Image (spheres, rainbow, N blue to C red):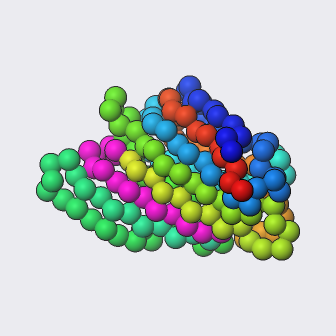
Amino acid sequence: TLLATTTASSDSTISFTSNIDSTYKEYVFKFYDIHPASDDVHFSFNGSIDSGSNYNVTKTTTNFRANHDESDSATDLSYRTGGDIAQGTGFQNIAAEVGNDNDQSLAGTLTIYEPSSSVFVKHFISRCNIYNASNYNRDDYVAGYFNTTSAVDAVQFKMSSGNMDSGVIKLYGVS
């Protein structure tokens, strides 16, 4: 069920502070052509347990990626030791090195499972495809959990530097 749609227009952050509750066990964010104002930046997210007053939920994550450059001269599949978080509260990068050329952007999904549970941690999975600043097609995978038994009731997205120039983020609830 579509719950919310937000269109970026030179926004420093995009926050979803409603519709994340016990109605659904699974919440999916879909990203469409997110284009940064700055070049070579990371698209990231964090959760809140206080309706968006603070975005600093402790998390543990893992991160790997596949790369293929435009000229077909380089490919790579690698674990990103610098892309994960071990019991930290910072924003998690889910799309790295996004370019800001006119034809560069990212698209993807973030799924959060049972964010209202008062018993278990909240697992999440993200997959984003990026046309990055070095003219690579990149497929970034991130998974982890919010290490809290408090309800995660808000989510915020931002770039590591600069604004989100354009793009659309949709929030869905899955029965």
Task: Look at the picture and state if 9 lies above or below 70.
Answer: above
Do we see residue 38 in this rendering? yes
- In the rendered image, residue 104, in percent from the top left (x then y), is placed at 35, 37
Task: Look at the picture and state if 122 lies above or below 44.
Answer: below
- In the rendered image, residue 7, in percent from the top left (x then y), is placed at 59, 29
Which residue is depicted at the point 22% across and 52% down? 69
As for residue 132 lying within the magenta part, the answer is yes
- On screen, residue 58 versus residue 76, left or right, reads right
- In the rendered image, residue 59, in percent from the top left (x then y), is placed at 66, 67
Q: In the figure, residue 3 lies in which quadrant?
A: top right
Which of these two is toward me, 57 or 20? Answer: 20
Give the position of the N terminus as an image quadrant: top right
Which range of residues does the magenta coloring cover? 131-146
Q: Which residue of the protein is positioned furthest toward the top in this rendering?
A: 9
Which residue is depicted at the point 78% across and 69% down? 148
Task: Look at the picture and state if 171 lies above or below 144.
Answer: above
Which residue is depicted at the point 81% across and 61% down? 116
